[in-house]
Every structure is written in C-alpha cells, then in structure tokens.
Image (tube, coloured by chain):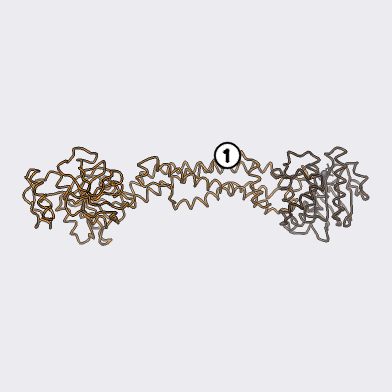
Chain colours: A orange, B brown
Amino acid sequence: MNLFRLAFAYLRDRVATTFLNLLLLVFGVTTITMVLLVAHQLRERVNREVAGIDLVVGAKGSPLQLILATVFQIDAPTGNIPLEEAEFIRRHPLVASAIPLAMGDSVSGFRIVGTEPALFSERGARMARGRLWQRPMEAVLGAQVARVTGLELGATFIGAHGLQGGLAHAEHPYTVVGVLEPTGTVLDRLVFTAIESVWLVHEHPRPSRAPSVHHREEHEDAGHEEHAEHEDHANDARQHGAHAERGPSPDAEITALLVRYRSPLAAVQLPRLVNERPRLMAASPAFEAARLLAILGFGLDTLRLFGLLVMAVAALSVFVALTNALEERRGDIAIMRVLGATRGLVLRELFLEALVLSAAGLVLGLALAHLLVELLARSFRQAFEAGLSGWVLAPEELWLVPAVLAVGVLAALLPAVRAYRLDLASTLARG
Amino acid sequence: MRVRGLALVRNGRTVLALDDWSVPAGGRWLIVGPSGSGKTSLLQLLAGLLLPTRGSIEVMGERIDAMPEARRDRFRGRTIGFVFQTLHLVRALSVLDNLRLAAFVVGERRSEDELRALLEAVGLADRARARLFELSQGEAQRVAIARALVNRPRLVLADEPTSALDDGNARAIMELLIARTSEIGAALVIATHDARLAPWFEHRLELGGTS
Ligand SMILES: Nc1ncnc2c1ncn2[C@@H]1O[C@H](COP(=O)(O)OP(=O)(O)OP(=O)(O)O)[C@@H](O)[C@H]1O
Ligand SMILES: [Mg+2]
C-alpha cells in the first residue's frame, strides 16, 4: 500500500467519472498543444525564410506583396526594377550585400529564379551534388524540385512562361548542373539559374538610358537589342563556346534585390533613400512577416481560446467530480483518520488523485497532439511542404506541464479544504 | 488507561461527566446507558477523536488529550483499534488492502502472510480479494475487527459492534473480539445498549443519571 495505490484505487472506483474527466483534459490539452505546435512551426518557418534578409528592394506596390513574392515565393511580384537602379543600391556603402532576383518562369509549377551564387552562401544552402551554373541556361535545382520532378544532373527542361505555367519557351532549354541540399526553406522549391538566363529567355527590352552597370564594358551584346531571337540564340551559343560571361542589355530589369545591411544605421537611412526613388520600394521582411503572422495569429488565437475553454470545462468537471466524491467519502476519510492518518495525509491523497488525473490527461493530450500534427503533415501535401512535423517540441509546451498540473491542484483545492476540516466526531457518530 | 475529572459539554449541555475511571492493561469493560447518555462520546474521547471540556485522559501513560493533533492521530493508529457499528471499510479497496491501509497510514508495513493470518483468525481466509459490497454485515464486521488489530493495539474500542447483527453473528463477533484481544493482551472497551453482551464482561460502566 502506498499513496499512489490509494489514489489509483479511488480513481478506479469511479471509473466513468474518471474517464469523462480524462477525456475532457485530453481534449483540452490536445487542442492547445496542436495550436502551439502549428503556430510555433509557422513562426519558425517564417523566421527562417526572412533570416539574413534585412530589406527587399522592388518595384512600387504593396510591401507585403513584395515580401510574399520574393521571400516566400507565394505571390506575383509587384513589377520589375531597372538594373541600373539596382546597381545604385548595390554600391551604397551601407549595404553589405545585395542579391538580385529575376523571376517570371516556372517548371512543373516550381518557379525559376535568376540570381547570383552569393544567394546560396547568404541563405546557407549547400550543393548536394553537381556544381553551380557557369553560363546562362544552366540550372541548379532545389532539393524538393529535384525530388518531385525527377530531373537529374545533365537533364534538360523547358521553362513555362508565367508562374502557373503558360506558354513554353521551347527554344531555350535549361540544363540541370546541380542540386541543393534540403534547407527547410522556400529554396527547396525553387530552380536557380544565372540572371542572364531569364533575360535570354524573355524578349530583350529596348534600350533607353545609358547603363551604369559595371558588366557593360565586356558586354558584347550591347546595342543588339533589336535582334530577332534566333540571332540572339546564335550569339548566345557563340558566347558559350567562348566561355564568356553574358552581360545584361542596357535597360535589363530584375524583380528585386535582397539586401543585407552593413550597419544598424542602414535600417534608418536606406529604406527612406530607396523609397525616395521614383521606381523603387523598400520592404522589411521582418516587419511584413510580423504582419503576416498577426493575420494568421488571429485564427490560431481563436483555436487557442477554444482549447482554454475546454481546459476550463475539464477543470470544472474535475472539481465537481472531486466534490461529489468527497461527499461519498466522508466515511472513508473518517475511517482513515481513526486508523491513524493525519489530516496532511488525507490532503496529500486527495491532491495526488487530482495530480494523477491531470498528469495522465497531460501526457495523453501531448502525445495525441503530436500524433495528430504528424498525421496532418502526412495527409496534406501543403502542410508537409510547409515543413510541418509532429516530431517537434514547441517551447510553449513546457509551460503546459505546470499549467495543467496547476489546474488539477486548483480543482482539488476546495474539496481538499473540506476534507481537511472534516469534523471527525460527528461524521463517525452518524455512522 | 485512566480518565480523571472528565467532563464534556456539547451545545452548552454537559453530556458526560466521569470523575475517575481506569481500565488496566488487558481489562475488559462494558459501557452501558440509554441513548444519548454519552457512550459514543466517551469512546471518541478515549480515542482522541474528541477533546474533553475538562479533565484528562491517559492512554498507556500518555495524555492523548494534550498531544498535538498529528501526533495524536499516529498515536491512535498505533495503540488503539476502533470498531464501529456499521461504518466498516474503505469502499474503493479490497479486504486485504483495507488491512494494508491500517498499517500504511501509520507508516508501518505488514507482510501479506501476516495479514492473511489475521483474516484467517476472523474466519475470512478466502475473502481477501473481496470488495465491501460483496460482503455481508457480519463478514464486514469481522474485517473491521481484523483491521482494528493490524497494528497490535493496546486498547480496542468498539461502538455498538453487534447492534446490526442477529444473535448468531453477534455471538460470533463477541467471541472473536474477546479471543483476539486477549491473545495480544489488549484491553477491550465496548459501548452498547445491546443486553446480549452482558455475560461476557466482568466490569460495567453505567452512564446516564448515575454519575
Ligand atoms: N456532533 C455532535 N455535536 C453536538 N452534540 C452531539 C454531537 N454528537 C452527539 N451529541 C450529543 O451528545 C450527547 C451524547 O451523544 P452520544 O452519541 O455520545 O450518545 P450515545 O450514548 O452514544 O447514544 P446512542 O446510544 O444513541 O448511540 C447526545 O445528547 C447528543 O445529542
Ligand atoms: Mg452511540
């Protein structure tokens, strides 16, 4: 005999009530934990995406849209910006690095992004196999793209115009030269290529201003903007043979620049500087991500509130059950006291019952929540691709442990006080 | 066990007054008196379940009425066995676990063999696993007696232990109580208005009007 056996005996003695209370507790804990888990992973994911990007510079429009399009890759870009404007930002002394992105095409629903290899080092992506591109029309695949499309090193593919897959650019096939390791970010779902590939695939823009791009000096194609596509192609092939770097046309455009600041001072000066330029807009990923999370957070808060409500009902139910049980147990408690149990022992036994119940509810609820989130991740492709997993611990879950146990203790408080005050003589005399 | 100058006032009424009364070790006393004469109150006083308004109560040379509560609880558990008229067992536990409980609450351990021997002595060797609702009144009363003996008390108090039983059972219970208490040398004090018990006792304490 020990206190646990005694507590278990009483819980077993009113098995239906115990089961109901356990069910309520598990339901509450599961709901709250699932919300915590999903919210935590969502936040983690969003933070992972914006990590290392202090500012995104793109065309004027909605800042949230710019961030969604360029950082999360889930919206259409706000437009393009001239390369010379981009160069102005790149050369600014407060900018540590600025990586251009040029978007527009897709393959099998995965976006093709023209950029520079520096993107990989900035975002901490490593090559799983193959190499970086060395000339236009060579492509490096994100891990998930490689897995889903089955494209291997040396394979060729054709980009479709637009992000949802429109007209194919059959005359400009890409060749796979490398595959990235999984990063757990949107990089896994992108195809990377030299920025020139994107220019090449699309019609060349007309010349307008004198370009101020440093590439220009070695740019063989300058002034050939009016050339038909086949000429371009030939030109391109020649360049490939010569291993030359193809430069942009004078008013080539990019979609956006991912900027990392050199000093905190930049956060004050740079956005204003950018926004003052007629065609540029600066958007802060951290700020827009926080806005995004606030929007999503509303739904999660509602769910969390629901979970708290269920917990409150569970606590009330445990309280009612213990109070009722106490009425039936006055005689038992009196017997225990006559047998030599102190008030303290009786009190400990009652609290232990509530603790055993809430601990069981906690453990089962946590386990069920993780299981359900994992099932959710496995049954919905989007959830899985968003990196959702049940085998992750949200730090807030640790708070749930003392919180739920406290709920149990709280529910047992009043019955325990009444047990403590039980008048032995009259309880016994009543028989 | 000895009481001196004992008085108990409940609701402004003196329900019990006992000048000097003592029970020697192993002694056997019957407390009789009409309903409301304070029999139950006296047993509760002796067990430290109730505190006197005046006077002192010594059990095994110790003032049970003057102890701190927690110590009084444990003292009662170790030295006094209590048997009630109908309040017998802890519902949620089996017969055997009820016996274990008696040892546990005072921090003792008893081997299963020991407890089974005790059950055998009250004629319930085969009901160790039974629950309260599976027992008859007489059987439950026997378990209560066995449990009162688990901690080898020096004093066994019984409040109307036979009032709910028929003649046969009442006789069996009395014989059991006397046999078991004399076996361990414990004093036995029974409060009752059950006239059937008189023949077993050499000493009687009459309450109500006489004192
Ligand atoms: N809890 C209580 N509070 C106040 N007075 C009580 C309480 N219990 C009993 N009394 C009073 O104390 C007196 C003695 O009661 P007690 O139960 O000791 O008598 P008794 O001799 O055991 O009676 P019975 O033969 O009916 O069991 C009675 O007058 C009763 O009304
Ligand atoms: Mg009585």
Q: Is residue A92 above or below residue B162?
A: below
Q: Amino acid at mark 1?
A: Leu
Mark 1 falls within which chain?
A
Report the side of B206 relative to A341 (left or right): right
In the rendering, at what x and y percent does residue A181 appear?
A: 31, 53
Report the side of A14 relative to B180 (left or right): left
| Residue at the disc numbered 1 | A20
Report the side of A172 relative to B161 (left or right): left
Residue in front for this viewpoint, A75 or A276:
A75
Residue in front for this viewpoint, B159 or A197:
A197
Q: Residue at x 61, y 39 (%)?
A: A17
Give the crowd class for mark 1: few <14, some 14-19, many >=20 residues within 10 Å: some
Residue in front for this viewpoint, A86 or A179:
A179
In the rendering, at what x and y percent does residue A368 appear?
A: 49, 44
Q: Quadrant of ligand 1?
A: top right
Asked if ligand 1 lies within 8 A of label 1, the reply is: no
In the rendering, at what x and y percent does residue A416 appear?
A: 64, 48
Residue in front for this viewpoint, A306 or B45:
A306
* Label 1 secondary element: helix
In the rendering, at what x and y percent does residue B178 appear?
A: 87, 49
